Image: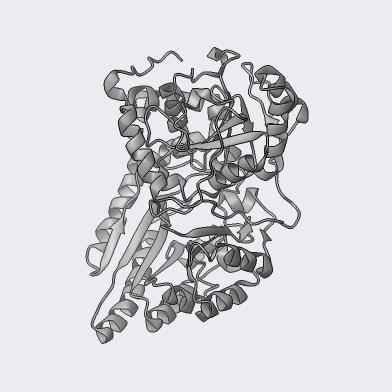
Amino acid sequence: MLLAKPSLTNNSFMSFYAQNLIANDILAKERGTIRKTFGSFFSAAVCFPNSYHVGASNLGTHFLYEQINLRPDFLAERFFTDLNPPISLESRQPLNAFNIILFTVPFEMDFANCLDMLHRAGIPIFRKERLPHHPLICAGGTAIAMNPLPMGDFMDAMVCGDGEILLSCLLDAVIEERGFKAGVLERLKNDGRFFIPTDDDAAIIPPKAACWDALHHPLSSVFLTPNTEFADTCLIEISRGCPFNCAFCYIGHNQNPFRYYGFERIREEFEKNRGRTNRFGLISSAVTAHPELERICGYALREKLEISFSSIRADCVPDILLELLLQSGQKTLTLAPETGSDSFRRKIEKGIVNEQILDAVRRASAMGFTNLRLYFMLGLPDETLSEIEASVELIHSAQKILLADGRKRGRVGEIVATVSFFVPKPGTPLADVPQMDISELKRRQQSFRSALKSLSHVRYQPADPYEAKAQMILSNQGREAAELLMRKWSGNLSWKAALRHSG
């Protein structure tokens, strides 16, 4: 696969003055920045392959930043795509000055950004082209655990699974080998828990590393900033895995068993961080499955904490949770029906029914919620037009509830119907089901959109079928998927254009 590398002209880069202005502005508004003297320790670049706005809400970034800096023999500084060429926020050092580069990649769509950050730092993107003096380049995160093979030509080592288990092993290897890259990789290979790619495809992907025992230390925000989706909010991971096992969901089939932190551990995190914020975001794939959720909510209500959640499962919405969300200033309830058909939902092993969804909407609306966000998935196996019609009817039923209560209050809110496309994920019951072609995904989306036009106070938020197709390739294919990444990166193309050029 021979593709031209993008040229780096003077116009491709910001001036160092401009970079300093951006970095200074970010750090001036941030609380919790860690500073150590560059050059006095082994150095690790913690790279999030997207903007600071996105990466500041990623707990993997917080974990690496804190845990590496806690070591007396290491320093960690952060990199995001905002600064070009890549320099660290803390000391403004270039990316190629670090001993080790650690990418944390939660989304497959950011794989191409990893290549771009390396290239703009003057580091060869292909593993086999790098020399001994180049940094050791590693990657982890959900997207890597799901399928590391598309990044096999680019990364020296990859972590598949929970990074808490393997981070110390990686850093110890760097120390013991004094940063000598070949020695470090040999140690990691002998360890057996790292994926060390080879040119002959002989490398074996190890079983996913996992914290199987009770989790001992909740991941939480190290730094706080207003420049992110969860502004000035301390994020706390309250559980890991998912007990529900929906047929399409990667986490429920690959990151189990469901493990959670007890109430006392979560309360300790609240108390530890209350001096710097009153806002907390509880992070979990299944927030409402936590067995002590009502106790957590009761504590937060009494202490007048502002709490936010990710989407809530409709069959687990106690009134105390709704009350807490209202106290926190939230007026939008977020649920994920996936489809409006009870029978089709059973087929994809999502065990909730429309009446549970509408009951949650009724109670929330009566308590003062004015808006509703509903997530739907199109292109699921055996889906027909009747399933799309059922989804529209469910939205219509929810709309009638919001309209009736809104008119009594004198203010009618809106329903946002957010659509995604089915992407088969490794290790799930639907892993081998072919994804519908792009033209069919477009047709179904248009049917959904058209059917909603007659409903007032309903806004449709579409999905990109080309991104769904690219995600399918990156989630499931082997090294050949690297061609798609190279096409997108080398030509600075949209996913639509990259797919077209990749045939």
Q: Residue at x 67, y 19 (%)?
A: 180
Residue 190 on image: x %, y %: 77, 26
Tell me what residue is drawn at x 55 percent, y 21 percent. 153
Relative height, residue 55 to residue 239 (above, below): above
Q: Quadrant of residue 65?
A: top right
Q: How many marks?
A: 0
Q: Is residue 456 shown left or right of residue 91?
A: left
| Residue 56 picture location, percent across and down | 46, 48
Q: Along the line of sight, which residue is nearer the eye, 317 or 265?
A: 265
The answer to whether residue 77 is above or below residue 279 is above
Residue at the image point whose x is 36% and y is 57% from the top: 418
Q: Position of residue 181 (x, y in %)?
A: 65, 20
Quadrant where the C terminus lies?
top left
Quarter of the image where one finds residue 135 = top right
Residue 409 placement, left or right of 160: left
Q: Is residue 212 left or right of residue 240?
A: right
Residue at (61, 41) in percent of width and height: 69
Q: Is residue 390 visible?
A: no
